[in-house]
Image (spheres, rainbow, N blue to C red):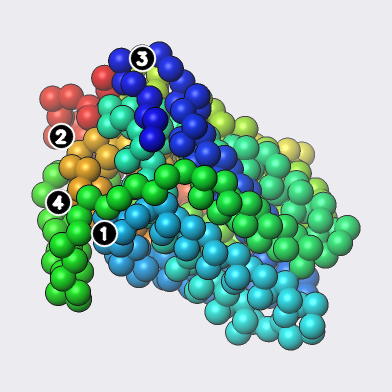
Amino acid sequence: MSTPDPSSPKRLLADAPFRRLWTSYVLCEMSARIAALAVPLLAILRLGAGASATGLMIGLNAVAFGLSSLVAGVLADRVSPRRLLNAGQAVIAVSTLSVALAERCGLLSFGLLYASQLVSGFGTAVLVAAGQVYAARITPHDRAVEVFSHLRGVDSIANLVGPGLAGWMVGAFGAPAALVTTAACLLAAMLIVRANPPVEPLRRNARGLQGVVEDVRDGWFALWREPWLRVLTLTGVALFILLKGHMALYALLATRTLGLSPALFGTVMMVGGVGALLPALTAKSLVRRFGDRSMIVVAVAAIAIAWAAVAAIGFLPAHVLLFAGAILLIDFGTTLFNILCVSSRQAAARPEMLGRISSFYRFVVGTAGPIGGFVFGPLAERTGTLPTYALMSGLCLALALSLAAWLRARPEPADLLAH
């Protein structure tokens, strides 16, 4: 297996194993973006779903993701991460195809959609855990920001192509065609990454259930004993709750409040790809100039500003352009936060602990996330979508200010990634 020489200017994508992994990520993220638009539209347009139903769908997906992350991270340290990555892709593909088949056969129901979200959440947890560990194993440790900037940059490609394709396909051929496309993308991703040699696990001393519990405990202590990672985890929890609230509302905002067609909605969502591209291209330079901690505050503040803009849509003209600009800023902040969060964990973790530390982070954040869907969905039905976005903006701004205050009160000698 070839890996980039850290002392060489060789680009990461010139390395064949990483290039295949990156290509597989492109297809996985594109399938996720198509499904993220097609499934809510299917629920809204075919079953008449409201904010509570879409919030429950998002919440169930997050519950499954969070709970599964603990075991997925332990497995990523114990078995071949490449094989585990393929398993996660297969689970999501089967879940997606089941929804498409049910719709074609007239068997679609909220129960099936809820079950599909649970299964997809499990598959995503496995895919994410295995993908992060596999990327760390085939690339140099000191290129963490560059590696995960490349992988998070995949979001921008998926956002530029996926939503527009999904909106067009839903409008022209129906949601099942869009969902079949997601399964095809996942199948192609599986075949591409299988060309890479499997990476052997760093740990083979599995001891059954007792060993899993001990591994989970080790991940908890390793994450919690470092103050910055602890604060980063708590920030991620709060932000993820708010983002899940946004995910429960944005399709309803676009289709019912703004009256956008599926095709126009998809086009607007494509603008978010530009927002995701900016941090993917500039994260390394921004960290060197301002430090990773300062840029994480900027990321959270950007999301707060975006939601404030959404809340102001009812009072300003050109609401479609304002919505598109808000989506761009949300994707910018989310991508920047994720790049720096993953890179900080990798910089602080020993290689054999990376899967467990990352899995515990995803467990804590993922299991808290459903609160956003369960709370903000029903709240929007009672008070309105725009006032709910105003509340979310205020809470997110308070989070950014609290994080900035903590950093001022507890300065660190150096940023982990600023080198």
Residue at 18%, 24% in the rendered image: 414
Is residue 236 visible in this depiction of the protein? yes
Question: Of tags 1 and 4, which is closer to the observer?
Answer: 1
> SS class of the residue under badge 4?
helix
Determine which of the numbered discs, if any, sits on residue 409 in the image: 2
Q: Tell me the quarter of the picture where residue 95 sits.
A: bottom right
Measuring 46% from the left and 21% from the top, which residue is drawn there?
A: 11
Q: Residues within 10 Å of mark 3 (few under 14, many from 20)?
A: few
267 with respect to 227 (left or right) = right
Q: Residues within 10 Å of mark 2 (few under 14, many from 20)?
A: few
Q: CA distance from mark 4 to mark 2?
A: 23 Å
Question: On residue 8, which mark appears?
Answer: 3
Gap between marks 2 and 3, in whole Å?
Answer: 39 Å
Answer yes or no: do the residues labelled 2 and 3 have beta carbons within 8 Å?
no
Please report whichever mark, 1 or 2, sits nearer to the chain's N-terminal start: 1
Q: Secondary structure at mark 1?
A: helix
| Residue type for callout 4 | Ala
Where residue 131 sits: x, y (%)?
42, 49
Q: Secondary structure at mark 3?
A: loop
Dot 1 and dot 4 residues touching (CB under 8 Å): no
Which of the two discs, 1 and 4, labels the residue nearer the N terminus? 1
Task: Say which residue label 4 marks.
Answer: 222
